[in-house]
Amino acid sequence: MKAAIRTQYGPPEVLDVREVPKPTPKDNELLIRVFATTVNRTDCGVLWGTPFVFRFFTGLTRPRHATTGTDFAGQVEAVGARVTHFKPGDRVFGFDDNGLPSHAEYMTLAEDRPMALIPAGLSYPEAAAGIEGAHYAYNYAKAIQKRGAKHVLVYGATGAIGSAAVQILKAAGLYVTAVCNTKNVERIRALGPDKVVDYEREDFTRDAERYDAVLDAVGKSAFGVCKKLLKDSGGVYMSSELGPRAENVYLPLLSPFMGPQKVAFPIPVDIKGSLRHMCLLFEAGKFRPLIDRTYPLEQIREAFVYVHSGQKTGNVILQIVAEE
């Protein structure tokens, strides 16, 4: 079988697509034929090994998995003797932010790892695109809802996280303002936000509305910049990145001394819960992921270069095999 292989951390040039032995599932594992996967921001962190904290989960000096990947959508080809919840022929998808060997034609995965049956009517590329960004978006959405927020601004609504957050928050009944660039205004408007702000034509921080929460879904802003958008009576800023000088990690600790407006940095941990929630949204017709480009496995280097450039809209798909 073909798989993307690397033996060290580094840029896309360390990756090669090679012929390797097809894996054999253990008693508690599934053999999955991978139809589609994505190249995403998490994959970039795992490939480069940056920020360094990634390496505590993916391998300190060298990658734990030679094959890259974090998510997948595919079909179960065989199961081990102790597998009880899945059977050959099942269409499944899953995610692990510590890395999976999913940039390959086949992979094995233990039954208790985060995965679920793909909802009916969903293609493999759509399923693959509805995991990584959606998991993080749902994590932020839960934290926002726990604070009783009703009005939310999502900066970076064109990314995998931002486009998912807009839909997840709207499905929960919140008022959502989506901030995006000019070329994607209509694509983002189609996701159903209450308001769209084109940051190339107007300064989104001058928005007259005040919000219970601001979610920076691309990590390109900062609390100091977005603070003016938060309600004087209290509001919270969240970001998908560490922020300038890692301020999004330590500012939440200073919240008791910061006045009514806060910074929160929720840690995403419950991937199985995210998968369950996304299945419900898919089945209800309340979520469809944005897909930017599709690459074959042989062009995985080009896919990583494009994602790392920060230019993508939504998700970038690796089509391992054509839909059957």
Image (cartoon, rainbow, N blue to C red):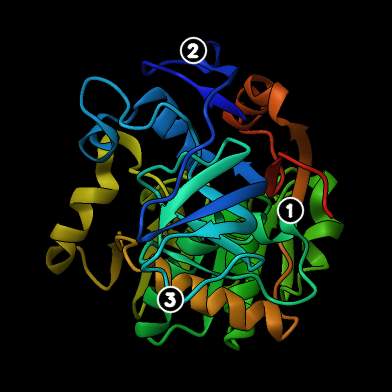
Q: Is residue 304 above or below residue 77?
A: above
- Quarter-of-image position of residue 57: top left
As drawn, the residue found furthest toward the front would be: 81
Q: Amino acid at mark 1?
A: Pro
Q: Amino acid at mark 2?
A: Val
Q: Which residue is mark 2?
A: 14
**Where does the image place residue 307, in percent across and percent down from the top left?**
62, 32
Of 176 and 5, nearer the camera is: 5
In the image, what residue occupies the spot 63% across and 46% down?
A: 37
SS for dot 3: loop
SS for dot 2: helix
* Viewer can see residue 175: no
* Viewer can see residue 209: yes
**Where does the image place residue 173, in percent across and percent down from the top left?**
60, 88
Mark 2 crowd level (few <14, some 14–19, many ≥20, 10 Å Cα): some
Q: Which tag is nearer the camera, tag 1 or tag 3?
A: 3
In the image, what residue occupies the spot 40% across and 87% down?
A: 148
Q: Which residue is mark 1?
A: 125
Q: Is residue 233 above or below residue 236?
A: below
Please tell me which of labels 1 and 3 falls first in the chain. Answer: 3
Q: Which tag is nearer the camera, tag 3 or tag 2?
A: 3
In the image, what residue occupies the spot 71% across and 39% down?
A: 320
- Quarter-of-image position of residue 22: top right
In the image, what residue occupies the spot 37% across and 32% down?
A: 65
Please tell me which of labels 3 and 2 falls first in the chain. Answer: 2
Q: Amino acid at mark 3?
A: Thr
- Residue 273: image tag: none
In 3D space, how far apart are the residues under numbered discs 3 and 2 (Cα atoms)? 38 Å
Q: Which residue is mark 3?
A: 84
Please tell me which of labels 1 and 2 falls first in the chain. Answer: 2
Mark 1 crowd level (few <14, some 14–19, many ≥20, 10 Å Cα): many
